[in-house]
Amino acid sequence: MSNNAIIVKDLNKKFKSGYGIFDINFSVEYGKVFGYLGPNGAGKSTTIRSLMGFIRSDSGTSNVYLENHANFKDDQTLVQDLVQYDSWTDANKIQRNLGYVPGEIAFPIQMTGIDLLKQVFKLRNMTNWDDVRKYIDYWEFNPNMKIKKMSKGMKQKVALVIAWMHNPDIIVLDEPTSGLDPLMQEKFVKLVQKSKEEGKAIILSSHIFSEIERTCDYVSIIKRGKIISTINIKDIQYNDEKTYEIKFKDKVIKSDVESSKWTIKSFNDNTLFAVVDNKNINDFIIKMGKNKLEFIKEHPLNLEQYFMKYYQNEIETDVADSLDNIILKSSTKERAISFELIKDTMRKTLGLWLFSTLIPVILIIVAFSIMINDSSIKEMIAQGNESWTKLLTQATVGLVVSSTGITYSLMLVYLLTSGNSIVAGEVDKGTMVNLLTTNQSRKSVILTKGGTFIFSLFMSIFIQFLTTIITISALGKGGEINFGLFAMYFFGLFLMLYVISSIAFMSSCYFNKSAASLSVAAGISIIFYVLYFASQISPSVEFLKYFSLNTLFKIEFTSVSEVSKYLGEYIALAVIGTGLYIASYFTFTKKDLPL
């Protein structure tokens, strides 16, 4: 009966990028450890994910053979048959029975290690907690700590406990010792060796050659998604050629040690390195023995040397080909990154933007619907006491575009919060360093972020303007309003909020802490707001209005022809806002950031 635990045959999985795995073939026997070697991106993790049933292959087969204890002979003796399971169609059964350590560990960060282990314990229907406890003790760590506070090595230990705790017959390990210190790596090797002696089948993907050599029975090397070599570890250890190092006591010239039967790798300072086939070792020793020797030493071939010997020429060719085929398109790349930056900037504040925009939109629709259909208002209009034009204009000013309206209040919160997070928030979280290490310049970063911030403000005001016009028109009163006048109202609201956004943006660029940025920007906006209303209390304190930018935003005109009286205020708002954005640009591009 076959002793295979895993058989992968002609497995293919190609991604849109062109990368993937192609014609992968290997098998793993029970009681053996299979090593999987290759550089990053070669296809190791893709193979393992296909085997585990996390992704579906394009073609080929990947089968896992697990023991079935459900069959009995006539005399009731147990028969342990191996049942074949397909990696994709039977993924749930395979994942339930295998032990697995992924290449990238992602545990729920709010849980403690012990809570996670208990949850897995219950999910696997285990009954003996001692099976878990022995591995916690073996790896010598405290599982009561929250996962988000654990180091990389501690998380790796939790993953190793999960992989072994249910005593699986097959264990799949993808870079399992990443983050472990040398002492724990040694314990890992011993655990793998013990598991192999117990008859378990193990797949081990690792970059540590000594780890593979000490644990694996055979190794496959993968490159660009294809297995380019499979070799038994013993064939490396007992290979057909040997490397010798010889130090001569007396002066020896190179011609004295040369021969067609061996290859001289180097000969310097009376020290010879030579590669000799096993059949020529006697001739080599005899010839070298004609000289006085200080020492002779054999350098056995190890896995790393085999890997590099097989791989070095291909690596050098790949690098050369890649460099030759590089086409520099810096401007196109920068535009692509800018587009990604725009999306990222908008995504981070999208929820608050939607809230600040949709609440006024809903309020506008509801308020005007109620107002226009109100019987008492209709009666007032019929009696000639009021006009629809005056009432609709007053409602728009009071409800939407004034500094006491719902739009101003909600957008104020949005601008202060979002403006603070645009730069200072990213510096505070340490994410700005990732952005500035791309080929995107600081100038491009700040212009993209500032432009996106202004655009989001403009779109919010524009959507509310359209909603107001469309709602009034849909209710049959479109002819009662002055579209130009309403446009000037909303434009004035935009300019005032534009100035506030520039204050928030400037604060975010100046400070490296989000708390300081938000405090300063919010403080300035509140002071302006308080001074504006305080100036209206009595003539004796009217001078306070000159210290508030809110004074420049007044809705006191009722026709487009009166706008000229307030044109200077609109221009002042535009100049102040633009000036602060320009200052923000230079602050960010010139200032050192703690990245």
Image: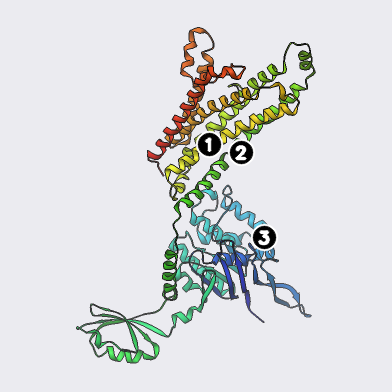
419 w.r.t. 67: above or below = above
> Is 117 in front, or is 437?
437
Say left or right for 357 vs 150: right
Residue 127 x, y percent position in the rendering: 67, 60
Q: Residue 533: x and y, percent? A: 54, 16
Rendered image quadrant of residue 78: bottom right
Q: CA distance from mark 3 to mark 2?
A: 39 Å
- Say which of 193 and 268 sits in front: 268
Q: Which of the marked residues, 2 or 1, is nearer the chain's N terminus?
A: 2
- Which amino acid is tagged 2? Gly
| Residue 279 appears in the rendering | yes
Q: Which picture quadrant has residue 443?
A: top left
Which of pointers 3 and 2 lies earlier in the amino acid sequence?
A: 3
**Disc marking residue 124:** 3
Q: Amino acid at mark 1?
A: Phe
In the image, residue 357 lies at what x, y percent?
A: 63, 33
Quarter of the image where the C terminus is located: top left
Assign a secondary structure to mark 3: loop
Query: Which residue lies under the disc numbered 1?
Result: 453
What's the distance in space between the residues labelled 1 and 3, CA to CA? 49 Å
Report which residue position mark 2 lands on: 351
* Sequence order check, earlier mark of 1 and 3: 3
Looking at numbered disc 3 in the image, what kind of residue is underneath it?
A: Arg
Residue lying at the far front of the rendered structure: 561
Residue in the image at 53% along x and 48% along y:
148
Mark 1 near mark 3, Cβ–Cβ under 8 Å? no
